[in-house]
Image: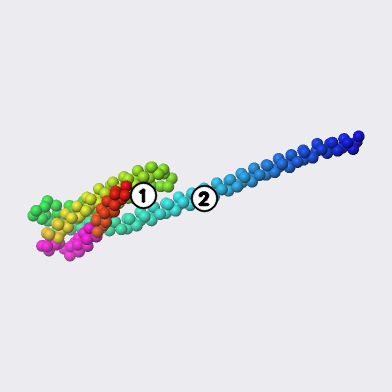
Amino acid sequence: MSESNSSSSYRHIIPDVEEGKAFKNATLNDKNIAEVQSILRSVENSRSRNEKTTETIIKILITIIIVIICSPIIICDLYFGLNDNSCVEEYPPSLSINLKTYMIVSALVGMSGLTLLITSSCFISSDNSDAYNSCIIAVIRLFSLIFSVFHLIWNILGGVVFWSFAYKNNLCDKNVSTYLFISLILKYITSCYAFKNNMKSDKKR
């Protein structure tokens, strides 16, 4: 009797022990899964932070490059347009635009375009939805097309005033004449390139 009772009690104990082991194993597995998930979340968060940091650095570098490239011409246009007295206030006989008006307007248009590019680069982000970024890019393309068309026409007018009147009649000081000669050529190249690029992007759409 005692042997049968002890064997039956062992039979009851063994399943309990196995169930306890299974419960412990399940608990350990849950803990391991939770730890792995927390590690993956931390890795993902650190990766997203690194991507945001990289994106911010790229935006800052692009902004600095744009400012470095565009600022000298904008500053020189304003400086010579406001301070020169040799030829910028002289009007050609067939036009009501002088070099002072040309350079000041050109500088203002350049500052507007620069502000638009910097502002748009700040608003475009990987955190935004694709529709939002696409909307910003569409607005940038529209304004860029308007700026490039206006700038091309305005530079042609400035070239007519300078080469057919001021340069031809040797009215300008050497510094102003040299600056206008070089800057007009650079503006023609950039204006034609920007206009051509905008037209290509519109055709692709």
- Pick out the residue farthest to the front: 204
Q: In this view, does 76 lie above or below 29?
A: below
The answer to which image quadrant residue 16 occupies is: top right
Q: Position of residue 197 (x, y in %)?
A: 29, 53
Residue type at mark 2 is Ser
Observer-nearest of 32 and 42: 32
Q: Position of residue 128 (x, y in %)?
A: 41, 44
The answer to whether 30 appears left or right of 154 in the picture is right
Residue type at mark 1 is Ser
Q: In this view, does 1 lie above or below 83?
A: above
User: Which residue appears at 12% of the width and 51% of the height?
Assistant: 96
Q: Is mark 2 on a helix, strand or loop?
A: helix
Choose the circle earlier in sequence order: 2 or 1: 2
User: Which residue appears at 19% of the width and 52% of the height?
Assistant: 153
Please state the extent of the stretch shown in magenta in the rendering. 166-188
The answer to which image quadrant residue 90 occupies is: bottom left
Q: What element carries label 1?
A: helix
User: Which residue appears at 29% of the width and 49% of the height?
Assistant: 203
The answer to which image quadrant residue 83 occupies is: bottom left
User: Which quarter shows the N terminus?
Assistant: top right
Residue 46's tag is: 2
Classify mark 1: residues with Cα within 10 Å, few (<14), some (14-19) or many (20+). Answer: some
User: Which residue appears at 35% of the width and 43% of the height?
Assistant: 135
Distance, label 2 to label 1, CA atoms, is 24 Å
> How many numbered marks does the figure carry?
2
- Pick out the residue farthest to the bottom: 174
Residue 121's tag is: 1
- Pick out the residue farthest to the right: 1
Observer-nearest of 123 and 81: 123
Q: Is residue 88 visible?
A: no
Magenta-span inclusion, residue 70: no
Helix, strand or loop for the magenta stretch, by majority = helix
